[in-house]
Amino acid sequence: MKLSRKSWLYLAFFVLLAVGFYFTLSVLIPGYSEKKFPPINTIRPFSFINQDGQRLTDSNMLGKVYAVEYFYTTCPGICPRMNKNMRKVYDELSKESDFKILSLTCDPKTDSAAKLKQYADSMQVDTQKWIFLTGRKDSLYSAARLSFSIDDPANIVRNEEDDFMHSQNWALVNRKGEVVGIFDGLKKSEVKDLIKKAKRLLSEK
């Protein structure tokens, strides 16, 4: 059955009306046109020491959106590249009051709070925004595997001295303390994706 010219005009009108309504919602309601980020994992309680010797816990981070990475100060390989990319995240989002970066060491035997302070100073960043953390090795590694989901829990070994964890993956955590994204810190496209999703999470109150 062929539609009359009048029917086509009505159809076109309603299509334009629907598109206009959707566009209005996407403007008035930030993130309306994007999908929600389902949680990958929920952060378990943690307690670490920052570069100033002060304790930081999971409770301190509630209500914040934050990116998490693991590195170590003497790393000659991927860490400098990762932190060069993390610097892009910092430069893009450091003015956001509710955004933080947590860089946890995977070599706490070497990376004391004082050592992390030296490293942070060399990076010339605001350590209220980009926080460097150390602590007990078992606690650091458990958080990476069981909370932040950036290393396989199956990698846990019986002898702690033989255990070494080093991942290029970053986690993005929402205000509720849920991991909502895992990103490869060496890939520029995924770094850009993290920034985009972090902005979306920050727009949600």
Image (cartoon, rainbow, N blue to C red):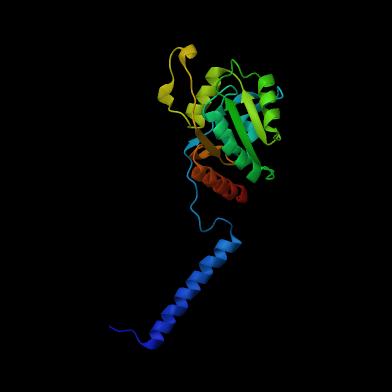
Q: What residue is shown at x 48% (from left), y 53% (from top)? A: 35
Is residue 180 in view? Answer: yes
Q: Is residue 33 above or below residue 199?
A: below
**Figure label count:** 0
Q: Nearer the viewer, residue 110 or 19?
A: 110
Find residue 17 and report its horizontal and vertical position in percent.
50, 74
Question: Which quarter of the picture shows residue 81?
Answer: top right
The N terminus lies in which quarter of the figure?
bottom left
Outermost residue toward the front in this view:
76
Q: Is residue 133 above or below residue 36?
A: above
Q: Is residue 70 above or below residue 184?
A: above
Is residue 205 in view? Answer: no
Outermost residue toward the left in this view:
1
Outermost residue toward the bottom in this view:
5
Find residue 87 and report its horizontal and vertical position in percent.
62, 38
Residue 30 falls left or right of residue 129: left
Find residue 97 and report its horizontal and vertical position in percent.
69, 43
Find residue 180 and report its horizontal and vertical position in percent.
50, 41
Q: Nearer the viewer, residue 86 or 60?
A: 86
Question: Which quarter of the picture shows residue 4?
Answer: bottom left
Question: Which quarter of the picture shows residue 153?
Answer: top left
Q: What residue is shown at x 45% (from left), y 12% (from top)? A: 159
Q: Nearer the viewer, residue 187 or 150?
A: 187
Q: Is residue 70 above or below residue 85?
A: above
Q: What residue is shown at x 49% (from left), y 29% (from top)? A: 167
Q: What residue is shown at x 50% (from left), y 23% (from top)? A: 142
